[in-house]
Amino acid sequence: MDTINKSVLDFDFEKLCSISLSHINVYACLVCGKYFQGEPPWGAGCCWRGTWGTPGYVLKPTFTAQQITNLDKQAKLSRAYDGTTYLPGIVGLNNIKANDYANAVLQALSNVPPLRNYFLEEENYKSIQRPPGDIMFLLVQRFGELMRKLWNPRNFKAHVSPHEMLQAVVLCSKKNFQITKQGDGVDFLSWFLNALHSALGGTKKKKKTIVTDVFQGSMRIFTKKLPHPDLPAEEKAQLLQNSEYQEMMVESTFMYLTLDLPTAPLYKDEKEQLIIPQVPLFSILAKFNGATEKEYKTYKENFLKRFQLTKLPPYLIFCIKRFTKNNFFVEKNPTIVNFPIT
């Protein structure tokens, strides 16, 4: 036990043999920290006996129902092996190359108590049956492992690498989201929540999961087709009498709400600096009050839409739309959104 070198042990990376790159029968050397294939020279599996202790818990942390219940009741600092203190759940995720967009989403989701509690206890999803050859359940397993590492009170370090989680994302998204290339956080959030829901056995309408229980709300969407703006007034009035131009209503569910910002001003103040406007959250939420109409344009047609929320989820996700694209560049709206914290 005296030869174990905790400073070189890192169980966040994929368990691949450092020589053959195989993941079959891999073990970790507790002295040099490398992974090897086959049996350890001192006998197969000896690391997993009673002497495994702390390294084993770091590799695969577990939580009892009582520990999960107490997570939000006591904020107790933990001390990592290198001496730094950290609060379980409030730890950094390594930016491997360009995965900060995914890290932000994973960090936010790890602090939603009902979702966190579900994934901290592997028994909640361990017995879910998936079709043969289905790889999507890997996403569930890796997210559960990451959640338990983030909330582990006995980590070696005060940060965690999401390497295995992100490898599952790359695989399951068919490389739509990658570690080496920046992605869109909202696109990733939308895909990830739907992929988790599906992998847990959920369906679009009937079968619910922890994901829909926590984040899914419902709304009514009212849509009215508009005549082409270049048409004469008489022809417009005539078209508006047709059933095609009458308001239609559909019921829809949502996982998050997209909020639009007012257009940023182009003028500068007296110090020749651009003014950064501020807007209250409730102003941009007016989009969903059932009365505010907004015009939406497609390649061929224009529509007026309004949205009315009919059911709110326990946890409501807002995605503030800051970026607009044109043929030349992507522009960011710097408007500050003021929101209440209680």
Image (spheres, rainbow, N blue to C red):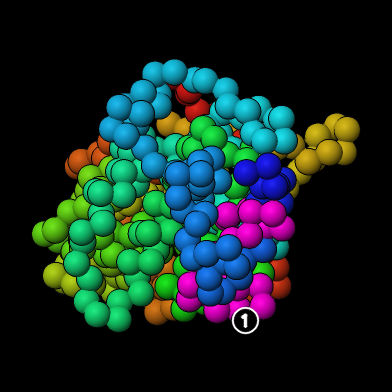
State the image coordinates of residue 140 (x, y, percent, origin top left): 36, 59
Image position, residue 229 (x, y; %) = 41, 70
Q: In front here: 77 or 259?
A: 77
Residue 130 rendering spot, x and y as whole percentages: 22, 71
> What residue sits 39% from the left and 51% below the top?
144
Left or right: 190 in relation to 238:
right
Q: Secondary structure at mark 1?
A: loop
Considering only vertical position in the picture, is 99 above or below 7? below
Crowding near the residue tagged with mark 1, few <14, some 14–19, many ≥20 C-alpha atoms within 10 Å: few
| Quarter of the rendering occupied by the N terminus | top right
Counting labels gives: 1
Horizontally, residue 295 falls left or right of residue 14, namely left
| Residue 209 in sight | yes
Q: Nearer the viewer, residue 342 or 85?
A: 85
How far across and how far down the image is residue 87, in percent?
A: 56, 28
Query: Which residue, as the protein is rendered here, is positioned at the far right?
Result: 271
Per the picture, the main secondary structure of the magenta-coloured stretch is loop
> Taking the image as drawn, is residue 194 in sight?
no
Q: Closest to the observer: 253 or 290? A: 253
- Which of these two is toward me, 184 or 9? 9
Question: Residue 307, relative to residue 276: is it above or below?
Answer: below
Q: Which quadrant does the C terminus fall into?
A: top left
Which residue is drawn at the image coordinates 47% and 61% (left, top)? 45
Res. 250 image quadrant = bottom left
Give the labeled residue for mark 1.
20
Q: Is residue 83 left or right of residue 247?
A: right
Q: Is residue 306 magenta?
A: no
Q: Which residue is pictured at 31% across the width and 44% down the height?
A: 121
Residue 251, picture quadrant: bottom left
Segment colored magenta: 10-33
Say whether residue 19 is magenta: yes
